[in-house]
């Protein structure tokens, strides 16, 4: 009698498992078809917008606190990005090392250094970025900048394609 109850329980669990598997399979097939349909609407490399990278001013905000060893490489990487209109804003957050001297040695019309001094300095990376964001309209004509973390990119070959994903305000 116990074996009959166990067999019924196992049979119910087996049927429930099959139903879950079938629902999951159906869901995955539907998602695959939707994704393929959206991919087929535009060919790879085809412009989906009449805008180009020249229509934007690229603004790179780079917070720096005691970055004398790496700041020159970070700025040079951003200067190597192929963009027609760019503005590199380095926020020196009250560095105590040679960061200001290293930045003073970089000559580029695209580079602006914002120096934060105590008591407004060294309050965190987010505070430095927010301060630069508030001062940005006074630094450049275009107000449609988008903060990018220079440690993770952009790389020189990515900027021409990045405009497709920009916020068009």
Image (cartoon, rainbow, N blue to C red):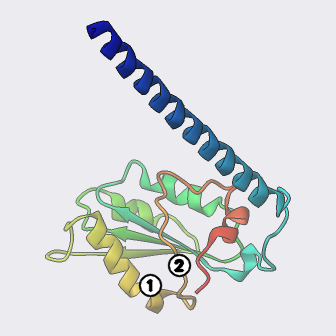
Residue shown at 23% from the left, 64% from the top: 124
Snapshot quadrant of residue 109 = bottom right
| Residue beneath disc 1 | 136
Observer-nearest of 57 and 116: 57
* One can see residue 45 in this view: no
**Residue 145: numbered disc:** 2
Q: Quick check: 61 above or below 21? A: below
Could you tell me which residue is drawn at 67 percent across and 50 percent down?
30
| Residue 144 locus on image (x, y percent) | 55, 83
> Does residue 156 appear to the left or right of 88 in the view shown?
right
Q: Quick one: 92 or 20, which is closer to the camera?
A: 20
Location of residue 22 with respect to 154 vertically, above or below? above
Q: CA distance from mark 1 to mark 2?
A: 8 Å
| Image quadrant where residue 161 sits | bottom right
Which circle's residue, 1 or 2, is located before the other in the chain?
A: 1
Q: Residues within 10 Å of mark 1 (few under 14, many from 20)?
A: some
Residue visible at 26% across and 9% down? 2
**Local crowd at mark 2 within 10 Å, few (<14), some, or many (≥20)?**
many
Horizontal side, residue 75 vs residue 86: left or right: left
Mark 2: which secondary structure? Answer: loop
| Disc marking residue 109 | none
């Amino acid at each position: 009698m116990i074996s009959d109850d166990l067999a019924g329980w196992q049979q119910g669990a087996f049927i429930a498992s099959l139903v879950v598997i079938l629902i999951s399979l159906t869901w995955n097939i539907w998602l695959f078809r939707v994704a393929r349909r959206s991919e087929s609407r535009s060919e790879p490399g085809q412009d989906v917008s009449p805008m180009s990278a020249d229509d934007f001013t690229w603004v790179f905000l780079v917070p720096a606190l005691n970055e004398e060893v790496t700041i020159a490489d970070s700025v040079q990487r951003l200067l190597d990005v192929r963009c027609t209109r760019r503005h590199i804003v380095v926020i020196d957050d009250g560095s105590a090392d040679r960061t200001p001297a290293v930045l003073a040695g970089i000559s580029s019309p695209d580079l602006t250094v914002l120096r934060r001094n105590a008591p407004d300095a060294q309050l965190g990376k987010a505070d430095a970025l927010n301060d630069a964001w508030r001062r940005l309209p006074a630094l450049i004509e275009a107000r449609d900048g988008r903060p990018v973390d220079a440690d993770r990119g952009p790389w020189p070959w990515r900027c021409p394609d990045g405009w497709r994903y920009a916020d068009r305000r």
